[in-house]
Every structure is written in structure tokens, then in C-alpha cells.
Amino acid sequence: MKSDFYAEYAPAAPLAATPRASLQLSCVVPAYNEQENLEKFVRALIPVVQGLTQDFEILIVNDGSRDDTHDVAMRLLAQGLPVRYLALSRNFGKEAAMSAGIDHARGNVVLLIDADFQHPLELLPDMHQLWQNGYEMVYGVIADRGAESGAKRLGTDLFYRLMNTGSNVQVPPNAGDYRWMDRKVVDALKALPERHRFMKGLYAWVGFKTAALPFVPQDRAAGESSFNLRRLGSLALLGLTSFTTLPLRIWSVIGGGVALLALLYGAWIIADTLIFGTDLAGWPTLSAGIMLFSGVQLMSIGILGEYIGRIYDEVKQRPTYLIARDEDRSPLREPQ
Ligand code: UDP
Ligand code: MG
């Protein structure tokens, strides 16, 4: 194998028995406004996959693109490529698009890969090899975030720190959605009932024997990233509220601490009054205290609100995505 792999965050699950059954590969490609990349990408992916197996399908999930991604996909179908094309009824976000792909994939292995050439195809033979060796899941880890802005790197770092102190599953930092998953893992993911799916957390939650392959992402081939800081922020909030209750606990601790201090201060005031008598001083302390603690209370209510909002979203039980169109030219059939 070319590259080294590491398994720092891998759970202690046993390796699967080898040799494996023959590979049937479903490649899930979420696409949002990828008109310039999609055809080139699929045409680049196919020969690499053919090097591994003849039994494969490419599952293009059009996540409500506003450009000509749809026409490009229809053209690929017309050209007779082994493609299944799912068009969602609107833009549901990448997590939902990947869930749609995972739900419809029929291979005994599912590969998640971006349509913008940021996930190097050269990793596929290594992923295949690790799976052959008994690993159930192999994912790419971004080895170098050099090209990203300082703010993005700082935010990412903070996010993984918060996430991993508060949660009992460890989400490996910088692991992307570039993933090779055995059917066992896929079925486990499909069985998880939540509607709002923070995939990075879910992969970690299901466990299984996992290996990580470091890679350096190339620049996007064409077009722009759909994840600006605001969208990344809301993804981070989804991750935190779905996988850790640490933010809630922090406020219990702060509340406890403040109450204790207030008690001591109260006792001191009483003593002070009894011993020295009092004139009505202290209003600046009072108003500063009121302002500080109303701010703290509003913040803690806001954090509560995030969790309640998440609960509200889940109890509505709306589907994760809706499919507007399903064109199936894939040679793979349901696993028996
Ligand atoms: N994507 C998607 N739905 C979205 C946003 C992105 O399906 O709402 C797809 C996109 O077409 C690409 C992958 O997700 O294949 C990664 O998106 P992007 O390159 O914009 O994100 P980044 O690589 O910057 O994290
Ligand atoms: Mg990208």
C-alpha cells in the first residue's frame, strides 16, 4: 500500500473475517451547483472504480441545484453510464443529500465522495485494500489545512475541542465525508432514527473497525464552496446539540458557582452592617451585578433554546429529504 494509515480514533472492534465477498461498489456523489464539475468528475471516477470492480453504480444526488447540474446528469444517463440519478425536491444540505444516497445505495460497499475533485481518487485502491484486510470503514483525514483561512481553522479547532470534551464518542478532527463503508456500517447508519443528521458524529457513533488515510485536499476544480462561515457555524451547532450536552452542564456549574459567591457576599454584607452600621452605598455594584447576571441568564436561556429547537425539529418527524426524480440506470440490484 502506498500511503500510511492511522487509527487513533478507531474503536476496538475486531477486524472482519477475510477474504471478503466480491466488491459491489455504490459511489454516492452529492452535487449542488456542480454543472462544471459533474461530468468530468464522473468520467474520471469510472475508470478508477473499474480498476477495482466491474460491479458498481454511481449515485448522483442532485441537492436542489440552481444551475444546470440536472441537465448534465440527464446527459450522463442518456449516454448509458451506470448511473442512478436522484434529484431532491429542493436544497436540503449535504448531510441530507448523503443520507439520500446512502438510503438508495445497493452495493455491499458505499463510497461517499465530493463532486469537486477535492477528494483524491488515488486513495480508492488503498481504501479497497484496507477493506479487504478487514476494516469496515476507511475515511480520508485532511492532513493539511494550509490553504484555509485562519478564522476557519480556528473555528474548526474550537469545534472539535468542544465536541470531544463533551461527548462520549470521539469525532476524529479533520475527518471529511470521504468515506468507504461496508454494508454493515451502512445498515447501522440507516437504522439511526434522527432526522437532522450530523454525519461526522453518526459515523463515530456507529463504531466498527475503522482506518484513517491522510490526504491533502486539492483546490476545488471549478465553482465555489457552498460552505461559508455562517453555514459552517450552523453545522457546528447541529453537531454540538446532537452529540453533547456539555453546554448545558457548563451553565449548571456557572450557576452553582455564582449562587455560592452571592451567598458569601450576602453574609459579608450582613456582618458589615451589624459591625459598622451602613449608609446606602453599593448601588454601582448592584447595577453591574444585575447587568452581568441578566446577560449570563439570557445566554444560558439561549443555549437551552438551541436544544429545545433541536427537540422540536426532531418531534415533527419530517423526512430528512424528499425525492423529486429517480432515474435508475444502475446495474446493481438490492442485496439479497
Ligand atoms: N453539496 C451538497 N449540498 C449542499 C452543499 C454541498 O450536496 O447544500 C455537495 C457539493 O456539491 C460537493 C460536496 O457537497 O460535492 C462538498 O461541498 P463543497 O465543496 O461546497 O464543500 P467544501 O468542500 O468546501 O467543504
Ligand atoms: Mg469541496
Image (cartoon, helix red, strand yellow):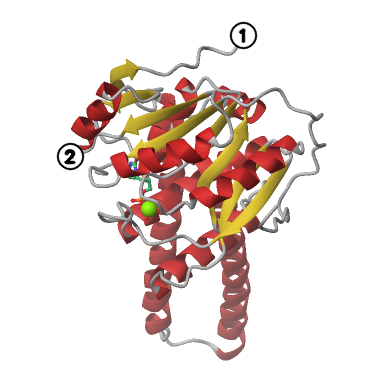
**Horizontal relation, residue 115 to residue 273: left or right:** left
To which quarter of the image does residue 165 belong?
Answer: bottom right
Residue at position x 45%, y 46% from top? 238
Q: Residue 336: which numbered mark, if any? A: 1
Look at the image and tell me in which quarter the C terminus lies.
top right
Q: Percent x, y for residue 297?
A: 43, 59
Residue at position x 36%, y 31% from top? 60
Q: Which of these two is toward me, 169 or 83?
A: 83
**Horizontal relation, residue 78 to residue 310: left or right:** left
**Horizontal relation, residue 81 to residue 1: left or right:** left
- What secondary structure is marked by label 2? loop
- Whether the residue carrying mark 2 lies under 8 Å from ligand 1 is answered with no
Residue at position x 54%, y 51% from top? 122
To which quarter of the image does residue 78 belong?
Answer: top left
Q: Residue 66: which numbered mark, if any? A: 2
Q: Percent x, y for residue 219?
A: 37, 62
Dot 2, how many residues are within 10 Å of its Cα: few (below 14), some (14-19), or many (20+)? some
Q: Percent x, y for residue 212?
A: 65, 51
Residue at position x 59%, y 62% from top? 161
Relative vertical location of residue 309 with respect to residue 221 in this rendering, above or below: above
Relative vertical location of residue 39 with respect to residue 10 in this rendering, above or below: above
Q: Percent x, y for residue 57?
A: 46, 25
